[in-house]
Amino acid sequence: MLLVTQVTLSQDSNSEPSKLWTLEECLQYALENNITIKDAALNYEQAAVNFSKAKSSRLPNLYGSASETFSNGNSIDPITSDFVSEQIYSTNVSLNSSVTLFQGNQINNQIAQNALLVNQSVFLKEETKNNIILSVLENYLQILYAKEGITIAENNVLASEKELERAKARLDAGTIALSDYTEAQSQAATNKYAVITAKNTYQQYIIALKQLLELDPTQDIEIETLGDNDNYIALELDKLAIYNKALGILPEINASKIGIQLSEKELDIAKGAYLPTLSLVSSLGSGYTSINDNNFSDQFNVNFNQRIGLSLNIPIFNRNQTKAAVQSAQINIEKAQINQQQTEKEVYKKVETAYQNAVSAQEQLIAAEASKAAAEQSYNLAQKKYELGGLSTTDLVISQNTYTNAQQNYLQAKYLSILYHQLLQFYQGNTIKL
């Protein structure tokens, strides 16, 4: 207890003033600041860089070279190619360039593949955003649920303290046994413990939300509570229609489809290695040699040369590397098709689960509301009987716990109903809004 108190004081002394956050503000802030989303955005930028790099592979290259050589004894003059037997100082400079004219259409396919990767990274980034949106929604509702749980626990503490006072008075009057009084004490202590637990749960959800929003750990935040409008939990939806719509709008579906196209392009690239490669090569060069009578500048003019030619590389046998690459690409196509089917199954499972849970939560909400009302009435009557001495402490404690459980069940059904309704709205492409 001492440690908890010290930590709390330290946080209060350094924390910023708390800000009231709506769900819309949380979602917008998370989309702008969450590092997971930023990482997905960097993946998109990297894909764009790779696409630009692939397009540049169509361009000719150009590089220069220079060398300075000293030789002694019998050797061949690198400039004149004469056989000499004396010391030679020689200098060579050149510009070289080459451009691939044909490479089994691999360059075009590589460019097309990188274009697909750019498109896929867009959908993967959107999928990341969707995951963060749903995480913020779930955490936001958990905070609201925990906050109302604190209120219930605090009300129980107030009620149990009053009941403890009555029990003490009845004990002093001799109308109850000491065991009844100690049971009232135990209930009051249990309720205080429940408040501490509820507040800790609330703070844990607050920490998780701040992590999603990338807020400073010392910043205090408050969540706007919901109004009394229950229209958002009315469910009149067709789950098959939701599923079909989700298949058309969820980014993971489009990403999996592009995955098949990527594997098909990989197969085209692999097959291109069976074909010859034709390149255009050219160079400009000159040099100087010390055994020539001309000076340095004259030799660079005299020895200036230009070359241009075609280079043809015909694959004959590369130890079955191309064959293996083609087979691997064909396997990857099948795996990509399976991945698409798996993704569609997962989407259907999400929609089906959300729909069934929404139906169940609404039915539970109706039952829980009736149970809460009955438990509240029963608890109120129990309190009056206890005041009049017509009810034991044990029965009063049981009545209070029954009412508390009914309140908790109602809260759980309420927020689950809201959550699953919002999930169904989200799978249809509608904006999440409480």
Image (cartoon, grey):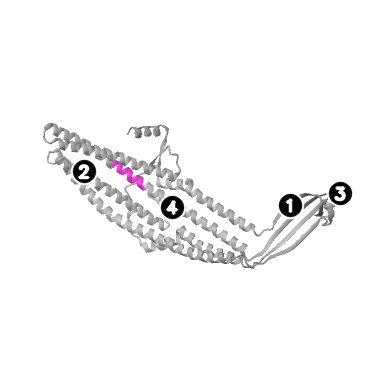
Q: Say whether disc 4 or disc 3 marks the residue closer to the N-terminus.
A: 4
Q: Say whether disc 2 or disc 4 marks the residue closer to the N-terminus.
A: 4
For badge 1, the amino acid type reads Ser
The residue at which mark 2 appears reads as 400
Q: Relative to 301, is 379 on the left or the right?
A: left
Image quadrant where residue 399 sits: top left
The residue at which mark 3 appears reads as 295
Magenta region includes residue 194: no
The residue stretch that appears in magenta:
141-151
Residue 411 - label: none
Distance between mark 2 and mark 4 Cα atoms: 40 Å
> Could you tell me which secondary element the residue under label 2 belongs to?
helix
Distance between mark 4 and mark 3 Cα atoms: 73 Å
**Which residue is painted at 39% across and 49% down in the image?**
137
Distance between mark 2 and mark 3 Cα atoms: 110 Å
Residue 65 - label: 1
Crowding near the residue tagged with mark 1, few <14, some 14–19, many ≥20 C-alpha atoms within 10 Å = few
**From this viewpoint, is residue 338 visible?**
yes
Q: Relative to 135, is 56 on the left or the right?
A: right
Q: Say whether disc 4 or disc 1 marks the residue closer to the N-terminus.
A: 1
For badge 4, the amino acid type reads Asn
The residue at which mark 4 appears reads as 131
Q: Nearer the viewer, mark 4 or mark 1?
A: 1
Q: Position of residue 199 (x, y in %)?
A: 33, 40
> Is the stretch drawn in magenta largely helix, strand or loop?
helix
